[in-house]
Image (spheres, rainbow, N blue to C red):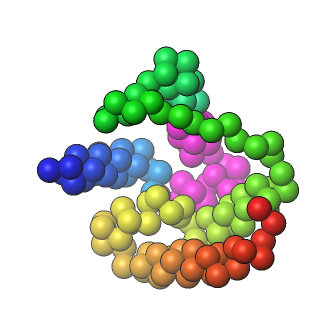
Amino acid sequence: MNLIKYLVVGFVFGIVLTKSEAISWYRIYEMFQFHSFHMYGIIMTAVAVGLIGIQIIKRKKVNDIKGTPIVIQDKEKGTIRYWIGGLIFGLGWALVGSCPGPIFILIGAGFSTIFLVFLGALLGTFIYGVIKDYLPH
């Protein structure tokens, strides 16, 4: 029964991303060419909602579904690793025209070439897992 609520949330998330055109390669291309505010608006809305949600959780000491208090650890100060990671992520996003979230939506919508992107994401994750002990954390 728990699986159903996750499936429903996933379907709703997929519908919202599709209807907002956040999975459109053209919209992503426009964003990286600085020709349109559309994707930046979606991203900033998500950041604002997340920021407000986190503040509510921290200030109201909200509990999770099981009654356990939600504890959100403070992040460490920004370092070069965040800049490098963000740069690699952004370059991959720009080259492929899709971030990891919509990959599953695009596969489900029948865009079979995105399966190559999915395999690339898995390969990148595997490579990170292999070399993570040698990276500065």
Which residue is at a point 65% across and 69% down the rendered structure image? 92
Left or right position of 93 against 118: right
Left or right position of 37 against 107: right
| Vertical order, 41 against 59 (above or below) | below
Q: Position of residue 74 (x, y in %)?
A: 68, 37
| Vertical order, 55 against 137 (above or below) | above
* Residue at the right extreme, as displayed: 80
In magenta stretch: residue 37: yes
Identify the image quadrant of the C terminus.
bottom right
Q: Position of residue 86 (x, y in %)?
A: 72, 58
Q: Position of residue 95 (x, y in %)?
A: 64, 71
- On the question of residue 116 being in view, the answer is yes
Which residue is at a point 56% across and 66% down the rendered structure image? 97
Q: Main secondary structure of the magenta part?
A: helix
| Vertical order, 112 against 24 (above or below) | below
Q: Position of residue 37 (x, y in %)?
A: 62, 41
Left or right position of 79 against 131: right
Q: Point out the stretch of residues depicted in magenta.
A: 24-49
* Residue at the front extreme, as displayed: 68
Splitting the image into 4 quarters, where does residue 65 fall? Answer: top left
